[in-house]
Image (cartoon, helix red, strand yellow):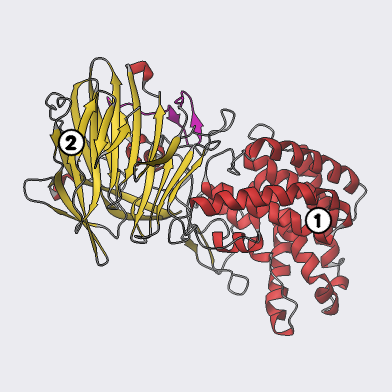
Amino acid sequence: MLETQAWEFLNVPRAAPGPIPWSGEDLPKLWHYHLNYCHFLNVDLTDSEDEPLLRSALAIALDWIDRNPTGGEIGWEPYPLSLRIVNWLKFLARNAERLKELGEDAAPGGSAIDRIAASLHVQALTLERRLEKDLRANHLLKNAKALIFAGALLEAPETPRWLEKGGKLLKAELAEQVLADGGHIERCPMYHAQVLDDLLDLQALTSASAETVGYGPMLSGLIAQMAGFLRAILHPDGEIPLLNDSALGIARSPQELLHLAGRPAAPPSVRGVTVLAASGYAVVRDLGSESCLVFDGGPLGPDYQLGHAHCDVLSYELSLEGQRVVVDTGVSTYEKGPERHYERSTAAHNTLRIDGEEQAEIWAAFRVGRRPRVGRIEGGDVQGCQLVRGKHFGYRRLGVTHTRVVIRTPESSWLVLDSLTGKGRHRVESFVHFHPAVALVPCAEGGRDVPEERLPTAAEGYKDVPPERLSGDEEAGEVQAMLPRWTLQFGDYRYFFMTLGGGELTVTRSWYASEFGLRQTRPVILWTWTGDLPTTMLYAFVPADATPPIVRRVDANTVEVDGATIRLA
Protein backbone atom coordinates (compact mmCIF):
# COMPACT_ATOMS: atom_id res chain seq x y z
CA MET A 1 0.00 0.00 0.00
CA LEU A 2 2.77 2.46 0.88
CA GLU A 3 4.48 1.95 -2.45
CA THR A 4 1.56 1.67 -4.86
CA GLN A 5 -1.25 3.37 -2.89
CA ALA A 6 -3.56 0.72 -4.32
CA TRP A 7 -5.84 0.54 -1.30
CA GLU A 8 -7.77 -2.57 -0.30
CA PHE A 9 -9.74 -2.99 2.90
CA LEU A 10 -12.51 -5.44 3.81
CA ASN A 11 -11.83 -7.36 0.56
CA VAL A 12 -12.83 -4.26 -1.41
CA PRO A 13 -10.03 -2.87 -3.62
CA ARG A 14 -9.73 0.73 -4.72
CA ALA A 15 -7.19 1.06 -7.50
CA ALA A 16 -4.54 3.78 -7.75
CA PRO A 17 -3.70 6.30 -9.10
CA GLY A 18 -5.73 9.25 -7.95
CA PRO A 19 -6.19 11.21 -4.73
CA ILE A 20 -6.22 9.15 -1.56
CA PRO A 21 -9.96 8.51 -0.87
CA TRP A 22 -10.03 9.66 2.75
CA SER A 23 -13.81 10.07 2.51
CA GLY A 24 -16.60 9.65 -0.04
CA GLU A 25 -19.92 8.00 -0.79
CA ASP A 26 -18.72 5.35 -3.25
CA LEU A 27 -17.34 2.96 -0.62
CA PRO A 28 -18.67 1.63 2.71
CA LYS A 29 -18.09 3.89 5.71
CA LEU A 30 -16.11 1.14 7.45
CA TRP A 31 -13.76 1.04 4.43
CA HIS A 32 -13.01 4.73 4.86
CA TYR A 33 -12.58 4.15 8.60
CA HIS A 34 -9.87 1.58 7.90
CA LEU A 35 -8.05 3.96 5.57
CA ASN A 36 -8.21 6.73 8.19
CA TYR A 37 -6.86 4.42 10.90
CA CYS A 38 -3.49 4.48 9.07
CA HIS A 39 -2.47 1.06 10.38
CA PHE A 40 -0.16 0.82 7.40
CA LEU A 41 2.01 3.57 8.95
CA ASN A 42 2.61 1.51 12.09
CA VAL A 43 5.82 0.03 10.68
CA ASP A 44 9.57 0.33 11.15
CA LEU A 45 11.15 1.83 8.02
CA THR A 46 14.60 2.64 9.36
CA ASP A 47 16.55 0.35 7.04
CA SER A 48 18.33 2.22 4.26
CA GLU A 49 16.53 0.08 1.66
CA ASP A 50 13.19 1.35 3.03
CA GLU A 51 13.85 4.98 2.15
CA PRO A 52 11.27 5.11 -0.71
CA LEU A 53 8.64 3.57 1.55
CA LEU A 54 9.49 5.96 4.38
CA ARG A 55 9.13 8.97 2.11
CA SER A 56 5.83 7.58 0.80
CA ALA A 57 4.57 7.06 4.36
CA LEU A 58 5.48 10.62 5.26
CA ALA A 59 3.71 11.93 2.17
CA ILE A 60 0.55 10.00 3.08
CA ALA A 61 0.47 11.51 6.58
CA LEU A 62 1.00 15.01 5.18
CA ASP A 63 -1.71 14.38 2.58
CA TRP A 64 -4.14 13.53 5.37
CA ILE A 65 -3.27 16.78 7.15
CA ASP A 66 -3.75 18.85 3.99
CA ARG A 67 -7.00 17.23 2.89
CA ASN A 68 -8.81 16.92 6.23
CA PRO A 69 -8.61 20.51 7.49
CA THR A 70 -12.04 21.24 8.93
CA GLY A 71 -12.46 18.71 11.73
CA GLY A 72 -15.73 17.57 10.19
CA GLU A 73 -14.39 14.87 7.87
CA ILE A 74 -14.92 11.17 8.62
CA GLY A 75 -11.36 10.83 9.91
CA TRP A 76 -12.14 13.22 12.75
CA GLU A 77 -14.81 10.94 14.22
CA PRO A 78 -13.54 9.78 17.61
CA TYR A 79 -13.04 6.11 16.76
CA PRO A 80 -10.77 6.51 13.70
CA LEU A 81 -9.23 9.52 15.43
CA SER A 82 -8.21 7.32 18.39
CA LEU A 83 -6.63 4.64 16.21
CA ARG A 84 -4.79 7.12 13.99
CA ILE A 85 -3.32 9.02 16.95
CA VAL A 86 -1.71 5.82 18.21
CA ASN A 87 -0.51 4.72 14.76
CA TRP A 88 1.04 8.11 13.94
CA LEU A 89 2.74 8.30 17.33
CA LYS A 90 4.24 4.85 16.77
CA PHE A 91 5.34 5.93 13.28
CA LEU A 92 7.18 8.93 14.71
CA ALA A 93 8.65 6.97 17.61
CA ARG A 94 10.09 4.37 15.23
CA ASN A 95 11.15 6.55 12.33
CA ALA A 96 11.83 10.13 13.53
CA GLU A 97 15.60 9.71 13.71
CA ARG A 98 15.74 8.26 10.22
CA LEU A 99 13.56 11.10 8.92
CA LYS A 100 15.99 13.59 10.42
CA GLU A 101 18.87 11.84 8.67
CA LEU A 102 16.98 12.26 5.40
CA GLY A 103 16.54 15.97 6.07
CA GLU A 104 12.79 15.78 6.65
CA ASP A 105 13.18 17.81 9.83
CA ALA A 106 14.13 20.85 7.73
CA ALA A 107 11.68 20.75 4.83
CA PRO A 108 10.71 24.06 3.14
CA GLY A 109 7.76 25.62 4.92
CA GLY A 110 8.49 23.84 8.16
CA SER A 111 9.60 20.44 9.39
CA ALA A 112 7.48 17.55 8.21
CA ILE A 113 7.94 15.95 11.61
CA ASP A 114 6.82 19.15 13.32
CA ARG A 115 3.75 19.33 11.06
CA ILE A 116 2.74 15.81 12.03
CA ALA A 117 3.35 16.51 15.73
CA ALA A 118 1.31 19.72 15.50
CA SER A 119 -1.54 17.81 13.83
CA LEU A 120 -1.38 15.14 16.52
CA HIS A 121 -1.67 17.88 19.14
CA VAL A 122 -4.87 19.13 17.50
CA GLN A 123 -6.17 15.58 17.05
CA ALA A 124 -5.65 14.77 20.74
CA LEU A 125 -7.37 18.01 21.80
CA THR A 126 -10.28 17.14 19.50
CA LEU A 127 -10.55 13.60 20.85
CA GLU A 128 -10.57 14.93 24.41
CA ARG A 129 -13.72 16.90 23.55
CA ARG A 130 -15.38 14.01 21.68
CA LEU A 131 -15.01 11.02 24.00
CA GLU A 132 -17.58 8.36 23.08
CA LYS A 133 -19.38 8.28 26.38
CA ASP A 134 -22.60 7.64 24.50
CA LEU A 135 -21.31 4.37 22.98
CA ARG A 136 -18.87 3.33 25.72
CA ALA A 137 -17.65 -0.30 25.43
CA ASN A 138 -14.63 -0.89 23.16
CA HIS A 139 -14.95 2.60 21.64
CA LEU A 140 -14.34 4.34 24.96
CA LEU A 141 -11.36 2.08 25.65
CA LYS A 142 -9.86 3.15 22.30
CA ASN A 143 -10.36 6.79 23.33
CA ALA A 144 -8.64 6.23 26.68
CA LYS A 145 -5.73 4.42 25.06
CA ALA A 146 -5.18 7.27 22.58
CA LEU A 147 -5.18 9.89 25.35
CA ILE A 148 -2.60 7.87 27.28
CA PHE A 149 -0.38 7.49 24.22
CA ALA A 150 -0.66 11.22 23.48
CA GLY A 151 0.12 12.05 27.09
CA ALA A 152 3.15 9.79 27.14
CA LEU A 153 4.68 10.54 23.72
CA LEU A 154 3.71 14.08 22.70
CA GLU A 155 5.39 17.20 23.99
CA ALA A 156 2.51 19.53 24.78
CA PRO A 157 1.21 21.52 27.77
CA GLU A 158 -1.83 19.22 27.98
CA THR A 159 0.07 15.94 28.30
CA PRO A 160 -0.31 15.63 32.12
CA ARG A 161 -4.05 16.20 31.76
CA TRP A 162 -4.35 13.61 28.99
CA LEU A 163 -2.47 11.05 31.04
CA GLU A 164 -4.66 11.63 34.06
CA LYS A 165 -7.93 11.66 32.13
CA GLY A 166 -6.98 8.65 30.01
CA GLY A 167 -5.77 6.69 33.02
CA LYS A 168 -8.93 7.28 35.05
CA LEU A 169 -11.09 6.38 32.08
CA LEU A 170 -9.07 3.23 31.39
CA LYS A 171 -9.27 1.96 34.96
CA ALA A 172 -13.00 2.63 35.25
CA GLU A 173 -13.86 0.99 31.93
CA LEU A 174 -11.65 -2.06 32.39
CA ALA A 175 -13.23 -2.71 35.78
CA GLU A 176 -16.59 -2.93 34.02
CA GLN A 177 -15.70 -4.30 30.60
CA VAL A 178 -13.48 -7.27 31.50
CA LEU A 179 -15.75 -9.90 33.05
CA ALA A 180 -14.81 -12.33 35.81
CA ASP A 181 -14.04 -15.13 33.32
CA GLY A 182 -11.80 -12.83 31.25
CA GLY A 183 -14.37 -12.24 28.50
CA HIS A 184 -15.15 -8.80 27.11
CA ILE A 185 -18.55 -7.38 28.01
CA GLU A 186 -19.72 -7.14 24.37
CA ARG A 187 -19.45 -10.96 23.98
CA CYS A 188 -17.90 -10.56 20.55
CA PRO A 189 -14.68 -12.57 20.00
CA MET A 190 -13.32 -10.16 17.38
CA TYR A 191 -13.64 -7.18 19.70
CA HIS A 192 -12.34 -9.27 22.58
CA ALA A 193 -9.16 -9.81 20.57
CA GLN A 194 -8.93 -6.10 19.76
CA VAL A 195 -9.28 -5.09 23.40
CA LEU A 196 -6.61 -7.61 24.39
CA ASP A 197 -4.37 -6.11 21.70
CA ASP A 198 -4.98 -2.64 23.17
CA LEU A 199 -3.96 -3.83 26.64
CA LEU A 200 -0.79 -5.40 25.24
CA ASP A 201 -0.03 -2.09 23.51
CA LEU A 202 -0.50 -0.19 26.75
CA GLN A 203 1.66 -2.71 28.58
CA ALA A 204 4.47 -2.12 26.05
CA LEU A 205 4.06 1.64 26.50
CA THR A 206 4.23 1.21 30.27
CA SER A 207 7.52 -0.65 29.93
CA ALA A 208 8.94 2.13 27.76
CA SER A 209 7.56 5.21 29.52
CA ALA A 210 8.00 6.23 33.13
CA GLU A 211 4.85 8.36 32.77
CA THR A 212 2.61 5.28 32.63
CA VAL A 213 4.45 2.91 34.94
CA GLY A 214 1.55 2.79 37.39
CA TYR A 215 -0.63 0.81 34.97
CA GLY A 216 1.65 -2.24 34.89
CA PRO A 217 0.21 -4.55 37.58
CA MET A 218 -3.39 -3.86 36.56
CA LEU A 219 -2.65 -4.56 32.90
CA SER A 220 -0.71 -7.77 33.59
CA GLY A 221 -3.58 -9.35 35.48
CA LEU A 222 -6.21 -8.40 32.91
CA ILE A 223 -4.05 -9.52 30.00
CA ALA A 224 -3.65 -12.94 31.62
CA GLN A 225 -7.44 -13.23 32.10
CA MET A 226 -8.33 -12.12 28.59
CA ALA A 227 -5.65 -14.30 26.99
CA GLY A 228 -6.98 -17.31 28.92
CA PHE A 229 -10.50 -16.64 27.68
CA LEU A 230 -9.33 -16.18 24.09
CA ARG A 231 -7.41 -19.45 24.12
CA ALA A 232 -10.38 -21.28 25.65
CA ILE A 233 -12.79 -20.39 22.82
CA LEU A 234 -10.53 -21.06 19.81
CA HIS A 235 -11.49 -23.61 17.19
CA PRO A 236 -8.96 -26.37 16.39
CA ASP A 237 -7.86 -24.25 13.41
CA GLY A 238 -6.57 -21.68 15.91
CA GLU A 239 -9.09 -18.97 15.02
CA ILE A 240 -12.00 -17.34 16.84
CA PRO A 241 -15.65 -18.40 16.53
CA LEU A 242 -17.71 -15.92 14.49
CA LEU A 243 -20.19 -15.05 17.22
CA ASN A 244 -21.96 -11.68 17.08
CA ASP A 245 -20.08 -9.11 14.96
CA SER A 246 -16.97 -11.24 14.45
CA ALA A 247 -14.93 -11.66 11.28
CA LEU A 248 -11.49 -13.03 10.57
CA GLY A 249 -8.64 -10.80 9.42
CA ILE A 250 -9.60 -7.70 11.43
CA ALA A 251 -7.96 -8.22 14.82
CA ARG A 252 -4.39 -9.43 15.20
CA SER A 253 -4.25 -13.24 14.99
CA PRO A 254 -4.88 -15.19 18.21
CA GLN A 255 -1.42 -16.79 17.88
CA GLU A 256 0.29 -13.39 17.90
CA LEU A 257 -1.81 -12.14 20.81
CA LEU A 258 -1.24 -15.24 22.89
CA HIS A 259 2.50 -15.16 22.17
CA LEU A 260 2.71 -11.52 23.28
CA ALA A 261 0.68 -12.39 26.39
CA GLY A 262 3.06 -15.24 27.23
CA ARG A 263 0.48 -17.97 26.74
CA PRO A 264 0.56 -21.10 24.52
CA ALA A 265 -0.59 -20.16 21.03
CA ALA A 266 -2.56 -23.35 20.30
CA PRO A 267 -6.10 -24.13 21.55
CA PRO A 268 -6.20 -26.22 24.75
CA SER A 269 -5.35 -29.88 24.09
CA VAL A 270 -7.74 -31.31 26.65
CA ARG A 271 -11.03 -33.17 26.73
CA GLY A 272 -13.92 -31.82 28.72
CA VAL A 273 -16.20 -28.85 29.31
CA THR A 274 -15.16 -25.28 30.06
CA VAL A 275 -17.95 -23.03 31.35
CA LEU A 276 -17.30 -19.31 31.04
CA ALA A 277 -20.22 -18.34 33.22
CA ALA A 278 -19.82 -14.56 33.32
CA SER A 279 -19.82 -14.29 29.53
CA GLY A 280 -22.39 -17.05 29.04
CA TYR A 281 -20.15 -19.20 26.84
CA ALA A 282 -19.29 -22.88 27.20
CA VAL A 283 -16.79 -24.97 25.26
CA VAL A 284 -16.78 -28.76 24.83
CA ARG A 285 -13.55 -30.32 23.51
CA ASP A 286 -12.93 -33.86 22.30
CA LEU A 287 -9.18 -34.26 21.93
CA GLY A 288 -9.38 -37.66 20.27
CA SER A 289 -11.31 -36.44 17.22
CA GLU A 290 -9.92 -32.88 17.28
CA SER A 291 -13.48 -31.63 17.71
CA CYS A 292 -14.80 -28.62 19.56
CA LEU A 293 -18.17 -26.99 20.20
CA VAL A 294 -18.47 -23.33 21.27
CA PHE A 295 -21.88 -22.60 22.80
CA ASP A 296 -23.35 -19.12 23.26
CA GLY A 297 -25.91 -19.10 26.05
CA GLY A 298 -25.28 -15.62 27.43
CA PRO A 299 -26.91 -12.20 27.10
CA LEU A 300 -26.50 -10.26 23.88
CA GLY A 301 -24.13 -7.83 25.57
CA PRO A 302 -24.36 -4.85 27.91
CA ASP A 303 -27.79 -3.23 27.81
CA TYR A 304 -26.25 0.18 27.10
CA GLN A 305 -24.37 -1.04 23.99
CA LEU A 306 -25.79 -3.79 21.80
CA GLY A 307 -24.56 -2.44 18.47
CA HIS A 308 -22.57 -5.61 17.76
CA ALA A 309 -25.20 -8.06 19.03
CA HIS A 310 -26.98 -10.71 16.96
CA CYS A 311 -30.07 -12.86 17.60
CA ASP A 312 -27.88 -15.84 18.50
CA VAL A 313 -28.91 -17.01 21.98
CA LEU A 314 -28.32 -20.78 22.33
CA SER A 315 -26.47 -20.85 19.01
CA TYR A 316 -23.18 -22.70 18.63
CA GLU A 317 -20.29 -23.45 16.30
CA LEU A 318 -18.94 -26.99 15.88
CA SER A 319 -15.63 -28.24 14.50
CA LEU A 320 -15.26 -31.95 13.72
CA GLU A 321 -11.95 -33.64 12.90
CA GLY A 322 -10.27 -30.23 12.87
CA GLN A 323 -12.70 -28.79 10.26
CA ARG A 324 -15.34 -26.16 10.96
CA VAL A 325 -18.63 -27.90 10.19
CA VAL A 326 -21.48 -25.92 11.80
CA VAL A 327 -20.82 -22.19 11.73
CA ASP A 328 -22.57 -18.90 12.32
CA THR A 329 -23.18 -16.71 9.31
CA GLY A 330 -20.54 -14.18 10.37
CA VAL A 331 -20.58 -10.57 9.23
CA SER A 332 -19.86 -9.23 5.76
CA THR A 333 -20.93 -5.61 6.18
CA TYR A 334 -21.82 -2.91 8.68
CA GLU A 335 -23.86 -1.01 6.08
CA LYS A 336 -27.57 -0.71 6.81
CA GLY A 337 -29.58 -2.94 4.48
CA PRO A 338 -31.01 -6.45 3.97
CA GLU A 339 -27.59 -8.15 4.20
CA ARG A 340 -26.80 -6.55 7.55
CA HIS A 341 -30.29 -7.31 8.86
CA TYR A 342 -30.11 -10.95 7.78
CA GLU A 343 -26.67 -11.49 9.33
CA ARG A 344 -28.01 -10.27 12.69
CA SER A 345 -31.28 -12.22 12.47
CA THR A 346 -32.31 -15.41 14.26
CA ALA A 347 -32.48 -17.27 10.92
CA ALA A 348 -28.76 -16.63 10.37
CA HIS A 349 -27.76 -18.56 13.50
CA ASN A 350 -27.84 -22.16 14.70
CA THR A 351 -30.80 -21.75 17.00
CA LEU A 352 -34.63 -21.77 16.97
CA ARG A 353 -37.10 -19.21 15.72
CA ILE A 354 -40.69 -19.25 17.02
CA ASP A 355 -43.69 -18.11 14.96
CA GLY A 356 -41.43 -16.21 12.56
CA GLU A 357 -40.42 -13.75 15.30
CA GLU A 358 -36.89 -12.59 16.12
CA GLN A 359 -35.29 -13.39 19.46
CA ALA A 360 -34.51 -9.68 19.83
CA GLU A 361 -35.88 -6.56 18.19
CA ILE A 362 -33.05 -5.65 15.78
CA TRP A 363 -33.29 -2.54 13.64
CA ALA A 364 -31.14 -0.11 11.67
CA ALA A 365 -27.53 -1.31 11.49
CA PHE A 366 -26.58 -1.30 15.17
CA ARG A 367 -29.80 -0.99 17.17
CA VAL A 368 -31.60 -3.44 19.44
CA GLY A 369 -34.88 -2.78 21.21
CA ARG A 370 -36.45 -5.71 23.05
CA ARG A 371 -33.82 -8.27 23.99
CA PRO A 372 -34.05 -11.79 25.49
CA ARG A 373 -33.45 -12.57 29.13
CA VAL A 374 -31.26 -15.66 29.59
CA GLY A 375 -30.86 -18.31 32.25
CA ARG A 376 -27.67 -19.56 33.85
CA ILE A 377 -25.40 -21.55 31.58
CA GLU A 378 -24.38 -24.97 32.91
CA GLY A 379 -21.99 -27.69 31.84
CA GLY A 380 -20.08 -30.74 32.97
CA ASP A 381 -19.69 -34.50 32.74
CA VAL A 382 -22.62 -36.87 33.18
CA GLN A 383 -21.94 -40.61 33.12
CA GLY A 384 -19.33 -40.41 30.39
CA CYS A 385 -21.09 -37.70 28.41
CA GLN A 386 -20.09 -34.04 28.29
CA LEU A 387 -22.90 -31.52 28.08
CA VAL A 388 -23.80 -27.84 28.18
CA ARG A 389 -27.21 -26.40 28.92
CA GLY A 390 -28.74 -22.96 28.44
CA LYS A 391 -32.15 -21.31 28.50
CA HIS A 392 -33.65 -18.08 27.24
CA PHE A 393 -36.96 -16.26 27.59
CA GLY A 394 -36.92 -14.18 24.40
CA TYR A 395 -40.23 -15.76 23.36
CA ARG A 396 -41.93 -15.43 26.75
CA ARG A 397 -44.36 -12.93 25.20
CA LEU A 398 -45.46 -15.77 22.88
CA GLY A 399 -45.82 -18.15 25.82
CA VAL A 400 -42.67 -20.15 24.93
CA THR A 401 -39.45 -20.89 26.84
CA HIS A 402 -36.53 -22.47 24.99
CA THR A 403 -33.99 -24.73 26.68
CA ARG A 404 -31.14 -26.35 24.75
CA VAL A 405 -28.85 -29.17 25.84
CA VAL A 406 -25.83 -30.14 23.71
CA ILE A 407 -24.31 -33.55 24.49
CA ARG A 408 -21.09 -35.24 23.37
CA THR A 409 -21.31 -39.00 23.82
CA PRO A 410 -18.41 -41.38 24.50
CA GLU A 411 -18.70 -42.47 20.84
CA SER A 412 -17.99 -38.87 19.74
CA SER A 413 -21.52 -38.20 18.58
CA TRP A 414 -22.89 -34.70 19.18
CA LEU A 415 -26.59 -34.29 20.08
CA VAL A 416 -28.55 -31.03 20.12
CA LEU A 417 -31.74 -31.38 22.14
CA ASP A 418 -34.24 -28.51 22.21
CA SER A 419 -37.00 -28.46 24.81
CA LEU A 420 -39.89 -26.04 24.30
CA THR A 421 -42.28 -25.43 27.16
CA GLY A 422 -45.41 -23.32 27.31
CA LYS A 423 -48.88 -23.48 25.88
CA GLY A 424 -50.62 -23.15 22.58
CA ARG A 425 -49.85 -24.03 19.01
CA HIS A 426 -46.64 -22.66 17.51
CA ARG A 427 -44.44 -22.87 14.46
CA VAL A 428 -40.86 -23.80 15.30
CA GLU A 429 -37.91 -23.43 12.90
CA SER A 430 -34.51 -24.91 13.73
CA PHE A 431 -31.58 -23.70 11.61
CA VAL A 432 -28.30 -25.54 11.09
CA HIS A 433 -25.75 -23.62 9.00
CA PHE A 434 -22.80 -25.48 7.50
CA HIS A 435 -19.35 -24.39 6.45
CA PRO A 436 -18.91 -24.15 2.64
CA ALA A 437 -16.40 -27.04 2.81
CA VAL A 438 -19.18 -29.42 3.96
CA ALA A 439 -21.23 -31.32 1.37
CA LEU A 440 -24.66 -32.73 2.25
CA VAL A 441 -25.79 -35.95 0.55
CA PRO A 442 -29.42 -36.98 1.25
CA CYS A 443 -29.97 -40.36 2.85
CA ALA A 444 -32.71 -42.65 1.56
CA GLU A 445 -36.09 -41.68 3.02
CA GLY A 446 -34.36 -38.80 4.82
CA GLY A 447 -34.28 -35.09 4.12
CA ARG A 448 -34.79 -33.50 0.74
CA ASP A 449 -33.14 -30.63 -1.04
CA VAL A 450 -35.01 -27.53 -2.04
CA PRO A 451 -35.22 -27.41 -5.86
CA GLU A 452 -32.59 -25.16 -7.40
CA GLU A 453 -35.16 -22.62 -8.56
CA ARG A 454 -36.20 -22.07 -4.92
CA LEU A 455 -32.73 -21.34 -3.61
CA PRO A 456 -32.42 -17.77 -2.34
CA THR A 457 -29.99 -15.25 -3.74
CA ALA A 458 -27.35 -13.75 -1.47
CA ALA A 459 -29.54 -10.68 -0.98
CA GLU A 460 -32.58 -12.78 -0.05
CA GLY A 461 -30.70 -14.95 2.42
CA TYR A 462 -33.24 -17.29 3.96
CA LYS A 463 -36.44 -18.43 2.22
CA ASP A 464 -39.42 -19.95 4.06
CA VAL A 465 -40.51 -23.51 3.37
CA PRO A 466 -43.99 -24.92 4.15
CA PRO A 467 -44.39 -26.61 7.58
CA GLU A 468 -45.79 -30.02 8.46
CA ARG A 469 -47.51 -31.00 11.67
CA LEU A 470 -45.64 -33.10 14.23
CA SER A 471 -47.37 -36.12 15.75
CA GLY A 472 -47.87 -36.44 19.52
CA ASP A 473 -44.99 -36.76 21.99
CA GLU A 474 -43.52 -40.17 22.66
CA GLU A 475 -44.50 -42.21 25.72
CA ALA A 476 -42.24 -42.37 28.78
CA GLY A 477 -39.92 -45.37 28.64
CA GLU A 478 -40.14 -45.69 24.85
CA VAL A 479 -36.84 -46.20 23.07
CA GLN A 480 -36.68 -44.19 19.87
CA ALA A 481 -34.37 -44.53 16.91
CA MET A 482 -33.01 -41.47 15.20
CA LEU A 483 -33.41 -41.27 11.43
CA PRO A 484 -30.38 -40.52 9.22
CA ARG A 485 -31.27 -37.58 6.99
CA TRP A 486 -28.04 -36.47 5.32
CA THR A 487 -24.44 -37.58 5.13
CA LEU A 488 -22.01 -34.77 5.85
CA GLN A 489 -18.82 -35.08 3.81
CA PHE A 490 -15.71 -32.97 4.41
CA GLY A 491 -12.18 -34.00 3.57
CA ASP A 492 -11.84 -37.73 4.25
CA TYR A 493 -14.57 -37.71 6.91
CA ARG A 494 -18.25 -38.64 6.90
CA TYR A 495 -20.85 -37.94 9.60
CA PHE A 496 -24.57 -38.62 9.57
CA PHE A 497 -27.02 -35.84 10.38
CA MET A 498 -29.82 -37.63 12.24
CA THR A 499 -33.09 -36.45 13.78
CA LEU A 500 -35.69 -37.57 16.25
CA GLY A 501 -39.15 -36.07 15.79
CA GLY A 502 -41.57 -35.08 13.09
CA GLY A 503 -41.96 -32.05 10.89
CA GLU A 504 -40.31 -31.20 7.60
CA LEU A 505 -36.58 -31.02 6.89
CA THR A 506 -35.21 -29.24 3.85
CA VAL A 507 -31.89 -27.89 2.62
CA THR A 508 -31.78 -24.32 1.45
CA ARG A 509 -28.83 -22.03 0.76
CA SER A 510 -27.45 -18.96 2.41
CA TRP A 511 -24.00 -17.40 2.70
CA TYR A 512 -21.04 -17.66 5.05
CA ALA A 513 -19.13 -14.44 5.73
CA SER A 514 -15.88 -15.33 7.45
CA GLU A 515 -14.49 -11.91 6.46
CA PHE A 516 -15.95 -8.50 5.69
CA GLY A 517 -16.81 -8.15 2.00
CA LEU A 518 -16.73 -11.92 1.43
CA ARG A 519 -19.81 -14.17 1.04
CA GLN A 520 -19.59 -17.87 0.20
CA THR A 521 -22.63 -19.99 -0.61
CA ARG A 522 -23.24 -22.85 1.80
CA PRO A 523 -26.02 -25.30 2.73
CA VAL A 524 -28.47 -24.74 5.57
CA ILE A 525 -30.73 -27.41 7.06
CA LEU A 526 -34.09 -26.08 8.11
CA TRP A 527 -36.28 -28.23 10.36
CA THR A 528 -39.84 -26.87 10.57
CA TRP A 529 -42.46 -28.15 12.99
CA THR A 530 -45.94 -26.89 13.90
CA GLY A 531 -47.89 -28.18 16.88
CA ASP A 532 -48.93 -27.80 20.52
CA LEU A 533 -46.40 -27.35 23.32
CA PRO A 534 -44.62 -28.76 25.20
CA THR A 535 -42.36 -30.63 22.79
CA THR A 536 -38.76 -31.60 22.14
CA MET A 537 -36.67 -31.70 18.96
CA LEU A 538 -33.40 -33.61 18.70
CA TYR A 539 -30.75 -33.80 16.01
CA ALA A 540 -27.29 -35.32 16.07
CA PHE A 541 -23.98 -35.52 14.24
CA VAL A 542 -22.85 -39.15 14.31
CA PRO A 543 -19.55 -40.48 12.89
CA ALA A 544 -20.28 -42.78 9.95
CA ASP A 545 -18.44 -45.68 11.64
CA ALA A 546 -20.09 -45.20 15.06
CA THR A 547 -23.23 -46.74 16.54
CA PRO A 548 -25.99 -44.12 16.72
CA PRO A 549 -26.91 -43.08 20.29
CA ILE A 550 -29.87 -44.79 21.93
CA VAL A 551 -32.38 -42.27 23.26
CA ARG A 552 -35.13 -43.11 25.76
CA ARG A 553 -37.67 -40.77 27.28
CA VAL A 554 -37.65 -41.11 31.10
CA ASP A 555 -40.25 -38.46 31.90
CA ALA A 556 -41.32 -35.02 30.70
CA ASN A 557 -38.05 -33.45 31.84
CA THR A 558 -35.52 -36.25 31.42
CA VAL A 559 -34.05 -38.46 28.69
CA GLU A 560 -31.45 -41.20 28.66
CA VAL A 561 -28.72 -41.05 26.02
CA ASP A 562 -26.71 -44.28 25.83
CA GLY A 563 -27.68 -44.90 29.46
CA ALA A 564 -26.69 -41.46 30.73
CA THR A 565 -29.56 -39.61 32.41
CA ILE A 566 -29.85 -36.08 31.01
CA ARG A 567 -32.02 -33.36 32.49
CA LEU A 568 -33.64 -31.26 29.77
CA ALA A 569 -34.31 -28.06 31.70
For this view, does 30 lie left or right of residue 133? left
The stretch of residues the image draws in magenta is 355-374
- The amino acid sitting under disc 2 is Val
Q: Position of residue 204 (x, y in %)?
A: 76, 59
For this view, does 8 lie left or right of residue 177? left
What label does residue 542 carry, if any?
Answer: none
Depth check: give the residue in front, 81 or 166: 166
Depth check: give the residue in front, 188 or 374: 374
For this view, does 388 lie left or right of residue 47? left
Query: Height in image: 562 above or below 569?
Result: below
Residue beneath disc 2: 465
In the picture, the quarter occupied by the C terminus is top left
Q: What crowding class fits label 1: few (fewer than 14 Cα within 10 Å), some (14-19), or many (20 or more)?
A: many
Residue beneath disc 1: 206
Q: What crowding class fits label 2: few (fewer than 14 Cα within 10 Å), some (14-19), or many (20 or more)?
A: some
Q: Position of residue 432 (x, y in %)?
A: 28, 44
On whether residue 182 falls in the magenta region, the answer is no
Q: Position of residue 268 (x, y in %)?
A: 50, 57
Q: Are marks 1 and 2 in contact (CB under 8 Å)?
A: no
- The amino acid sitting under disc 1 is Thr
Depth check: give the residue in front, 205 or 314: 314
Can see residue 397? yes
- Label 2: which secondary element: loop
In the picture, the quarter occupied by the N terminus is bottom right
